[in-house]
Amino acid sequence: MPTVILHTSHGSVKIELDAKSTPLTTENFLQYAKDGYYDQTIFHRVIDGFMVQGGGFGSGMAQKTTRASIQNEAKQGIRNQIGTIAMARTQDPHSASSQFFINVANNGFLDFQAETLQGYGYCAFGKVTEGMDVVKSMAKVETTTRDGHQDVPEEEIVLEKIEILEEN
């Protein structure tokens, strides 16, 4: 199981990725990490009791360019429970690229239900093994609306870098 550490301005979060169930999603995330894509990005959407989301914007809500979208593996992924990391996407089930979120609640309504537009779900591909207190602290910050985006932290939460510990 590949393991990564998210070094953030709030502290570190260790995550074990599920490469066996979600190989495409895990490899996509690891490639962005290896490329340094996530360095100095922000958690741009946080909702206490739901999730914290990052991986697509730099400081000041500067949107980053991504690689092509990947196939949604939610059907074989793990459930969206407290502490799992999942891919964010648009209404198109197969539109995930770089953005991810960490669940701070059991969000079963995000799980795969059926191969339909409404039922595809969001692919959870790993779980926090250390630092859930850091994630919970992120979820509790004051938020605002900025550049048309809601639930943006008033004070930026920076993802300084992702360290890859194991990749077997």
Image (tube, rainbow, N blue to C red):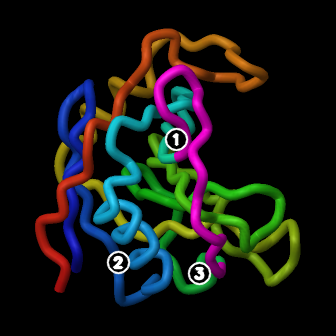
Q: Residue at x 45, y 41 (%)?
A: 104
125 or 89: which is nearer to us?
A: 89
What whole-number distance in Å separates the C-alpha atoms at marks 1 and 2? 19 Å
- Is mark 1 in CB contact (under 8 Å) with mark 3? no
**Magenta-drawn segment:** 56-71
N-terminal-most mark, 3 or 2: 2
Judge left or right: residue 10 versus residue 23: left
**Label placed on residue 53:** 1
Question: Dot 2 corresponds to which residue?
Answer: 18
Q: Amino acid at mark 1?
A: Gln
Question: Dot 3 corresponds to which residue?
Answer: 73
Q: Amino acid at mark 3?
A: Glu
Tell me the crowding category of disc 2: few under 14, some 14 to 19, or many 20 or more residues within 10 angstroms, Cα based. some
Is 57 a magenta residue?
yes
Q: Quadrant of the C terminus?
A: bottom left
Q: Residue furthest right?
A: 117
